[in-house]
Image (cartoon, grey):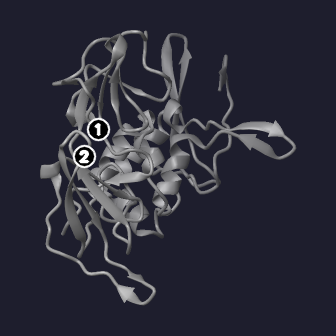
Amino acid sequence: MVRGDLVEVRSVPPFRKAAFAFALFLSGGCAFTQVGVGGDYTTTCTFAGRDSTPCGTCIAAKCQSKVDACCADAACRKSNKSDLGFGVTTGDDGTLGKLDGCGEGKSCYELEVDPAAKAMAACVQASCSDVCDTRLASARKATATSCEWKTNSTKERYCACVVPSTSNGVASAPNDTACGPSAGICCADLDWPAPASKCTCDPPSCNAYAGDVCICERQTGSSVVSDCARGPCCLTSDGECRCDPTRRACPEGDTPVKSCSRAEVRCSPGKRAVTTCSP
């Protein structure tokens, strides 16, 4: 933090070697001080898994500039942890902590839905989905599936698939039924395409509700509309896009958007988006 002419540099995790720029607004001008960690001065911000996991090395090779930009931004590198005393803490390590988990090969979902990580997440989704555990833009595909087409309560067609597995010594058989984006949004279990994991492609819909509330979601209501635009419109953490004129602003954690359409609908928590369910 800056107190007059005094610059205090707080500690960071030992593996985080970064060049941070601290702006000192003195005498109407700015001065920048480069700070290294552990005596190792560098312009590259490191993170867990950077040199040891397929996901981490991919991020380092293709998205390092986005990572460095976060390290150089005070809001992006801020930790949300609070020390309650007696060795007890609350909160998390912020955006860079979520990057560490992703780079180590764990789920990248928390990074993907963090507004401060928008640039990093977009890069990881576009460039590293084949080796990173992304949920919003996964490139993982099954080599064999057993799929079928069904009809929901509103008489819309959707398809569902399962990866063949062995139960009690008996192996289930795959089929050639196609199930893909023509049916709608495809969402799979987080361990897809592991044996017995499931995937469903179903059509999104925008629905009007009481109080002029309008929600674009993965189900069809009794009053279907083409899109939603009245009131603050927000992308919610559960994959919906909601416009609610009774609110003044989006709740904390939701992302404000100008309007909602079926294109904004995403998979619900506990599911990952895939391009198709069948091979």
Residue 62 image point, x, y percent: 31, 56
* Residue at 68% over, 38% down: 10
Residue 162, by quadrant, is bottom left
Is residue 18 visible in this depiction of the protein?
no
Dot 1 crowding, Cα within 10 Å, few <14, some 14–19, many 20+: some
Q: Is residue 234 above or below residue 127?
A: above
Quadrant (top left/top right/bottom left/bottom right) for the N terminus: top right
- Indicate the amino acid at tag 1: Gln
* Residue at 38% over, 61% down: 132
Q: Are marks 1 and 2 in contact (CB under 8 Å)?
A: yes
Residue at the spot of label 2: 152
In this picture, residue 86 sits left or right of residue 212: right
In this picture, residue 16 sits left or right of residue 210: right
Nearer the observer, 255 or 148: 148
Dot 2 crowding, Cα within 10 Å, few <14, some 14–19, many 20+: few
Residue 38 image point, x, y percent: 65, 54
Is residue 242 visible in this depiction of the protein?
yes
- Secondary structure beneath dot 2 equals loop
Nearer the observer, 74 or 125: 125
- Indicate the amino acid at tag 2: Asn
In this picture, residue 160 sits left or right of residue 97: left
* Residue at 67% over, 16% down: 4
Residue at the spot of label 1: 219
Nearer the observer, 141 or 80: 141
Residue 252 — which label? none
Of mark 1 and mark 2, the one earlier in the sequence is: 2
Mark pair 1, 2: CA separation: 9 Å
